[in-house]
Amino acid sequence: VHGEGDHGFVPLLIDLARKQAAAAYVGEGANRWPAVHRFDAARLYRLVLDSEFAPGTRIHAVAEEGVAFRSLAEVMGRRLGVPVVSKSRAEAAEHFGWFAHFAALDAPASSARTREQLGWRPEQPGLIADVDQPAYFKT
C-alpha cells in the first residue's frame, strides 16, 4: 500500500538506500510486488463494508499485480542520487537486514475476482509513478 504519508515498506527502503548509499535489488530484480494506492484500498474496503459477503470471502486490494522490485530501486536511486545495484541473496542480508527476505520475495497477486464482484477499479497513480514524487524523499 502506497501514497503520501506512507509509513510502510517504501519509506523503509528509501531510508535504507540513504544509509547504504545505494538503492539495491536482489539478483535481476525481476521479483514482483503487488501494489495499491491507499485511497484505492480505502475505497475498496468501503465497498466491502457496504456489501454482503459470505464469511471467509477473500478480497484482494491489488491495483498492480506485480511491480518489478528493480523498477522501484531505480526510482529511489535516481531520486536520491545513489547508485542502483544488484545484490546476491547473501549480500542482500547485509544491505537490507531483516527486510532481505521481503526484498527478494516474488509475490504477484490478482484482484480480478474482487474487481468483478464489486466493480472496483483503481484510479490513483501506480506504485512507480507515486514513489517518483518529492513527498517520498523529504528528509
Image (cartoon, rainbow, N blue to C red):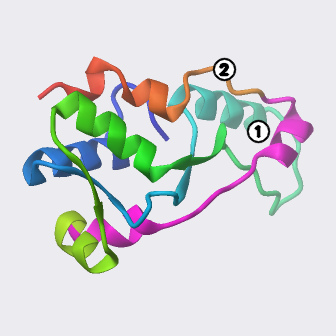
Residue behind mark 1? 48
Give, as a three-letter code, the residue at label 2.
Glu
Vertical comparison of 52 with 79: above or below = below
Instruction: Sort mark 1 into few (<14), some (14-19) or many (20+) by Cα contacts within 10 Å.
Output: some
Residue drawn where x is 9% and y is 50% of the image = 19
Quarter assignment of residue 5: top left
Q: Which mark is residue 87?
A: none
* Left/right of residue 139 with respect to residue 125 in the rendered view: left
Image spot of residue 129 (x, y percent): 47, 25
Residue drawn where x is 42% and y is 67% of the image = 104
Residue 20 vs residue 114, the one in the foreground: 20
Residue 135 vs residue 93, the one in the foreground: 93
Q: Earlier in the sequence, mark 1 or mark 2?
A: 1
Residue behind mark 2? 123
Residue 114 vs residue 46, the one in the foreground: 114
* Left/right of residue 22 with respect to residue 112 in the rendered view: left
Tell me the element at label 2.
Answer: loop
Query: Where are the magenta residues, as a range?
Result: 97-120
Residue drawn where x is 89% and y is 56% of the image = 54
Residues marked 1 and 2 touching at CB (< 8 Å): no
Image spot of residue 91 (x, y percent): 23, 74
> Is residue 116 located in the magenta-colored stretch of the structure?
yes
Which secondary structure class fits the magenta region best? Answer: helix
Q: Is residue 21 visible?
A: yes
Tell me the element at label 1.
Answer: helix
Residue 64 vs residue 1, the one in the foreground: 64
- Nearer the camera: disc 1 or disc 2: 2
Give, as a three-letter code, the residue at label 1.
Val
Q: Is residue 8 visible?
A: no
Image spot of residue 135 (x, y percent): 28, 21
Residue drawn where x is 66% and y is 20% of the image = 123
